[in-house]
Image (cartoon, rainbow, N blue to C red):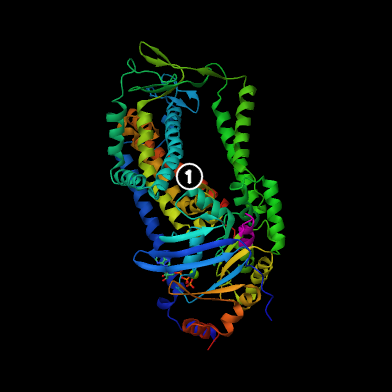
């Protein structure tokens, strides 16, 4: 009887068949569009007598890049190829994006908490901060940071060092552990150490979620990270040494040097993104039931303990997905580097494209690079999200 | 059928309220409330919805602020002095209608967090206290679960254990069984009855008449923000003096 009833429905009223038809139609349209695009590209390439090949990546790049190292390996424009220069750009993008995400999160969370402060002045200041930064274009903010603030600093010849740190219109120079030139590259050790630290953190927080045994996962992670760094340092024959900046006739040498472009881009991205993260934090905190605060206060926990131990850990769960979006935005916004002359991956690829005449390929690579970065961020955010999900029945 | 009355005449005062007034904006939720609770006394607060029972009980540990009048808890007056507020909160435990357990912490962590953070107890010592309390409320096997994995009755028992972990002298209950399914009410009331006989001072907002008759020393009846009647449970339920109390009882006892 059931099958009879189904058979009596004409196909244009059958939900299942309608859904199937819609999908087929959609697929056909997508395939046609893709074919059209590929065909157009091919025609265009033929007309201009170009072929879509990546062979040029093996040729010597031959152009200078400010801040030219890739993951600890220096870049030499006279001998290194395009392939390598892409990695220089990628490294610069990662540098600003990863540092930016961390700092923007810290700043944004603080401002978000400030927004909810019962202190009228703090709340107002945070509100003004958020509204100004959120409602002006990030490019304008970058220009202000670069041309007005950073380039407005005193020249290096006039800069006064504070605790060995020079801050001038040619950037920041600070004492640091620097790579010895003829020793093995220490950078991979740092990466491995960070990854191991993260893995240890994931393992112990997962175990804590499974068994409910409280483990100081954060401390274990820091210990693991430090341990790997130290082991690596001695295993590679101590490839780092202490270096302090020294002022010479042509600026400073030695120590860790941070360019004005990097500084402006970092500050610009951090401050801009922090205004969004502040709003996410505020919404996250407000999403936690008021009864949680009351229970904590009734137990005698203070304001900051309540916030830190009870409210923020719960707010974070709501905040993670929108935070992930902000991380994606920050990474993509870092391509505005080109406006102030920072050698990020898009900037470097643009130069490479112009110089080699292979613009289509370089933009294609840029697209792929940003896609990979975005997918990686999304993947990590999802991983964290599922690792910290609430256990309920 | 009632228990012999405790002799509380010589007991020191645990909670003293004098002419307390409380406003939400222009709405007056408490009107000239005065009362006294002796140490070791078990007081049940009842009254119609919106009569100010929660408001009053929440004023006692400063979850709400009263505007005029005096509230003295354990000899300390509730003022804006944070030292006084902290001192009172240390001595006063509270159990809420909606449990308010911390969902991201395990049952044991829910109980140990305050002793560790506020009383600076060592973790091992705090966990010992926590396990003893879970034993006392009858669910030691749930220690490493998360609140969301427990039934309502179990959650409320954890909440009681959590409050007791601070070794309060006074326990406040705001309708602790109102959010529970009928079959779970008894397990929570049993814990509360056991607590009532332990000598702790208790102030409970609850409409559980059986509980009130069995363990309460006194019933305080609220209506429209005022204390209308105070009496022993037997007197109150058998011959209420005021018309409002009569009306209220006829409504909750089912006509
Ligand atoms: N935060 C608030 N803002 C404004 N009015 C409030 C607030 N909290 C309570 N009230 C009002 O104060 C009065 C007393 O509320 P309260 O919660 O103390 O009543 P109750 O006796 O506990 O009632 P119930 O049995 O429903 O819990 C009610 O009229 C209520 O609407
Ligand atoms: Mg109430």
Image quarter (top left, top right, bottom left or bottom right) of the C terminus of chain A: bottom right
The residue nearer to you, when weighing A161 against A187, is A161
> Which region shows up in magenta?
B158-169
Q: Residue furthest bottom?
A: B255
Residue at horizontal 59%, vertical 41%?
A: A218
Q: Quick one: SS at disc 1?
A: helix
The quadrant in which residue A247 appears is top left
Q: Is residue B155 visible?
A: no
A280 over A241 or under it: above or below: below
Q: Chain of mark 1?
A: A
- Is residue A205 at all visible to an observer of this figure? yes
Q: Work out which quarter of the rendered image holds the N terminus of chain A and state it.
A: bottom right
Q: Nearer the viewer, residue B14 or B12?
A: B12
Circle 1 is placed at which residue position?
A377
Residue B160 in magenta stretch? yes
Mark 1: few, some, or many residues within 10 Å (few <14, many ≥20)?
some
Residue shown at the point (68%, 55%) measured from the top left: B130
The total number of labels drawn is: 1
Q: In the image, residue B76 lies at what x, y percent?
A: 53, 54
């Amino acid at each position: 009887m059931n099958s009879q009833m189904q058979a009596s429905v004409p196909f244009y009223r059958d939900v299942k068949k309608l859904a199937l038809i819609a999908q087929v139609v959609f697929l056909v349209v997508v395939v046609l569009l893709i074919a059209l695009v590929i065909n157009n590209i091919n025609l265009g390439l033929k007309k201009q007598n170009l072929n879509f090949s990546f062979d040029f990546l093996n040729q010597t790049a031959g152009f200078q890049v400010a801040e030219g190292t890739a993951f600890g390996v220096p870049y030499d424009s006279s001998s290194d190829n395009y392939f390598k220069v892409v990695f220089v750009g990628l490294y610069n993008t990662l540098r600003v994006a990863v540092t930016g995400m961390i700092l923007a999160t810290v700043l944004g969370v603080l401002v978000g908490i400030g927004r909810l402060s019962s202190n009228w002045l703090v709340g107002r200041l945070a509100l003004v901060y958020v509204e100004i930064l959120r409602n002006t274009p990030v490019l304008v903010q970058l220009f202000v940071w670069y041309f007005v603030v950073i380039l407005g600093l005193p020249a290096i010849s006039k800069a006064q060092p504070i605790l060995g740190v020079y801050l001038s219109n040619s950037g920041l120079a600070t004492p640091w552990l620097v790579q010895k030139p003829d020793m093995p590259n220490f950078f991979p050790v740092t990466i491995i150490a960070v990854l191991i630290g993260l893995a240890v953190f994931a393992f112990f927080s997962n175990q804590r979620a499974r068994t409910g045994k409280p483990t100081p996962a954060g401390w274990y992670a820091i210990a693991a990270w430090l341990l790997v760094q130290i082991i690596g340092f001695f295993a590679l024959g101590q490839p780092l040494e202490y270096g302090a900046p020294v002022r010479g006739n042509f600026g400073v040498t030695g120590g860790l040097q941070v360019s004005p472009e990097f500084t402006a881009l970092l500050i610009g991205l951090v401050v801009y993104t922090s205004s969004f993260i502040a709003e996410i934090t505020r919404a996250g905190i407000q999403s936690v039931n008021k009864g949680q605060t009351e229970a904590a206060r009734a137990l005698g926990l203070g304001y900051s303990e309540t916030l830190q131990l009870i409210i923020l850990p719960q707010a974070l769960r709501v905040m993670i997905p929108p935070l992930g979006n902000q991380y994606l935005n920050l990474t993509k916004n870092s391509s505005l580097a080109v406006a102030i002359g920072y050698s990020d991956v898009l900037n470097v690829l643009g130069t490479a494209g112009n110089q080699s005449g292979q613009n289509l390929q370089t933009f294609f690579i840029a697209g792929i690079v940003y896609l990979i970065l975005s997918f990686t961020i999304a993947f990590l955010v999802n991983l964290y999200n599922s690792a910290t999900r609430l256990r309920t029945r | 059928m009632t228990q012999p009355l405790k002799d509380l005449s010589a007991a020191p005062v645990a909670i003293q309220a004098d002419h307390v007034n409380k406003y939400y904006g222009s709405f007056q939720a408490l009107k000239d409330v005065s009362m006294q609770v002796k140490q070791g006394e078990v007081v049940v607060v009842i009254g119609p919805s919106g009569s100010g029972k929660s408001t009053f009980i929440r004023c006692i540990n400063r979850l709400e602020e009263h505007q005029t009048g005096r509230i003295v808890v354990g000899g300390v007056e509730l003022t804006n002095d944070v030292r006084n507020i902290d001192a009172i909160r240390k001595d006063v435990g509270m159990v809420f209608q909606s449990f308010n357990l911390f969902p991201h912490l395990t049952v044991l962590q829910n109980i140990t967090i305050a002793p560790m953070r506020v009383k600076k107890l060592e973790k091992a010592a705090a966990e010992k206290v926590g396990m003893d309390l879970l034993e006392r409320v009858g669910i030691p096997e749930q220690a490493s679960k998360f609140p969301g994995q427990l039934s309502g009755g179990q959650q409320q028992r954890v909440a009681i254990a959590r409050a007791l972990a601070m070794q309060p002298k006074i326990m406040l209950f705001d309708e602790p069984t109102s959010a529970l399914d009928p079959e779970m009410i008894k397990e929570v009331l049993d814990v509360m009855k056991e607590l009532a006989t332990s000598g702790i001072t208790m102030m409970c907002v609850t409409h559980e008449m059986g509980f009130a008759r069995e363990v309460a020393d006194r019933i305080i009846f609220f209506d429209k923000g005022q204390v209308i009647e105070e009496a022993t449970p037997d007197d109150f339920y058998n011959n209420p003096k005021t018309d409002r109390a009569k009306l209220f009882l006829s409504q909750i006892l089912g006509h």
